Amino acid sequence: MVGLGPWPSVPAVVADTADVPDDLVLPTLKALMTLPGAADSCALEGRPRADATEYCVAIYKTPQDWRVTWPIRKLVDAHSACKPPFGGVDDADFGRNMIVFGYAHNHPCGLFASSADLMRFPAVRTPEGAWVMVGYAMTPNGEPALDAQGQRIQAWAWLATGHLEEPRFYKWNPAGEVFRWREDKKHWEFQAICQPQSSSILSPDQAIPPQCSPELTDWY
């Protein structure tokens, strides 16, 4: 899946930084929550309604600014997952081969990240052409992004969840370090180190919570 960009709902951000600026991440997560079926779309028994929808976006950098792709959703079972644009970005101004720094998605029923989320995000392409969980920002052809010291830049995954009036925003890296955005403190606060659990053989598609230390209380 190749993501088209930029997403007009999230203005591009000009920033001379190696890491994705929060001025781009936070508007992206807030915009995801406002899409049709993206939030508060659960029935009373906690199951997603027919209109519940997960959306995925890629966060990337062009030669002049930071941008986000248009949201992608599945045409079938959109409530259960979305397809990240692991194929890279096709930007309206700069074409393809943009550096992808990570992926963001929403959970319409307010759940925390599932074990599948931790295994799926972030992923980048190797020079051999395979997408794997290696945790560094890269272009689709495998060219890594480097900081001022020549070091590879860590990729992240972001999640928008909770309720529309009380959103919760998370980010995590391949090491399983989970942070939550604290609006009152204006920073990402460390929560736990989480590792995915294997799905049940009888229910391989079930969204089971990861094992976190310390234990997180906001899976729901």
Image (cartoon, rainbow, N blue to C red):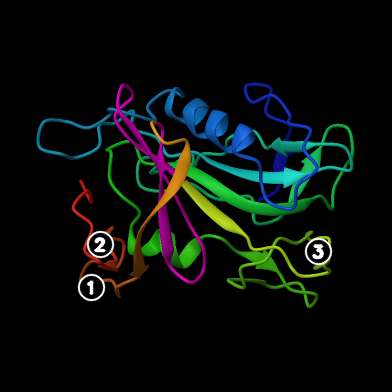
1 vs 3, front mark: 3
Q: Is residue 83 magenta?
A: no
Q: In the rendering, at what x and y percent does residue 49 appear? A: 25, 31
Is 167 displayed left or right of 130 in the figure?
A: left
Residue that numbered label 1 is attached to: 200
What amino acid is labelled 1 in the image? Ser
Is 174 displayed left or right of 40 in the figure?
A: right
Q: In the rendering, at what x and y percent does residue 26 appear? A: 53, 33
Is 178 or 135 nearer to us in this picture? 178
Within-10-Å neighbours for mark 3: few <14, some 14–19, many 20+:
some
Is 217 displayed left or right of 73 in the figure?
A: left
Q: In the rendering, at what x and y percent does residue 107 appear? A: 36, 41
Magenta stretch bounds: 159-183
Which numbered circle lies on residue 85?
none
Q: Is residue 171 magenta?
A: yes
Looking at the rendered structure, the secondary structure element under dot 1 is loop
Residue that numbered label 2 is attached to: 208
Q: Tell me which residue sits at (85%, 48%) in the image.
A: 96
Within-10-Å neighbours for mark 1: few <14, some 14–19, many 20+:
few
The mark that comes first in sequence, 2 or 3, is 3
Q: Tell me which residue sits at (49%, 63%) in the image.
A: 120
The mark that comes first in sequence, 1 or 2, is 1
Residue that numbered label 3 is attached to: 146
Is 134 displayed left or right of 193 in the figure?
A: right
The answer to which image quadrant residue 208 occupies is bottom left
Q: CA distance from mark 1 to mark 3?
A: 39 Å
